[in-house]
Image: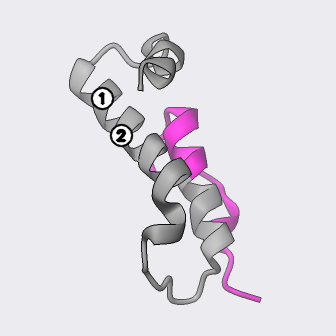
Amino acid sequence: MNYLRTHFRSAYSDEADLEARCLLAFSAAIASDLIAAEHPEHTREQILQRAATLLFSGSTGDQVNATASEPRA
């Protein structure tokens, strides 16, 4: 978590936002295979890419132009 804090701190000054992003990034990286969830109309890879884009871009979901907006092939 300290590693993530170090990298996110320069982009996020709000401590609660910083901690939330670190927790989400850690959870996605470590426990993604343990999270059983279906994603209607999207592949798991599309959703994980969208999550990474949201976490690391500093953008909100409305601002992100990611592949998750494209339906499953």
* Residue 25 in the figure: left or right of residue 50: left
Most distant residue in the right direction: 73
Which of the image's four quarters has the C terminus?
bottom right
Which quarter of the figure has residue 16?
top left
Whether residue 61 is in magenta: the answer is yes
The secondary structure type at the circle numbered 1 is helix
- Residue positioned 51% across, 62% down in the render: 32
Which quarter of the picture shows residue 12? top left
28 to the left or right of 67: left
Query: Where residue 13 sits: x, y (%)?
Result: 33, 13
In the image, the segment drawn in magenta is 52-73
Query: Within 10 Å of the Cα at label 2, are there few (<14), some (14-19), or many (20+) other Cα atoms?
Result: some
Amino acid type, label 1 = Glu
How many badges with numbers are in the image? Answer: 2
Q: Which residue is painted at 65% across and 54% down in the image?
A: 65
Q: In the picture provided, is 38 more to the left or to the right than 68?
A: left
Mark carried by residue 23: 2
Q: Is any part of residue 50 visible from this angle? A: yes
**Distance CA(mark 1)–CA(mark 2):** 6 Å
* Helix, strand or loop under label 2: helix
Q: Is residue 11 above or below residue 26?
A: above
Magenta span includes 34: no
Task: Residue 67: give its label.
Answer: none
The quarter of the rendered structure image containing the N terminus is top left
Left/right placement of residue 13 relative to residue 67 reads left
Question: In front here: 41 or 15?
Answer: 15
- In the image, 10 versus 33, the foreground residue is 33
Instruction: Between residue 39 and residue 31, name the one nearer to us.
Output: 31
Circle 1/circle 2 CB separation < 8 Å: yes
Residue 19 tag number: 1
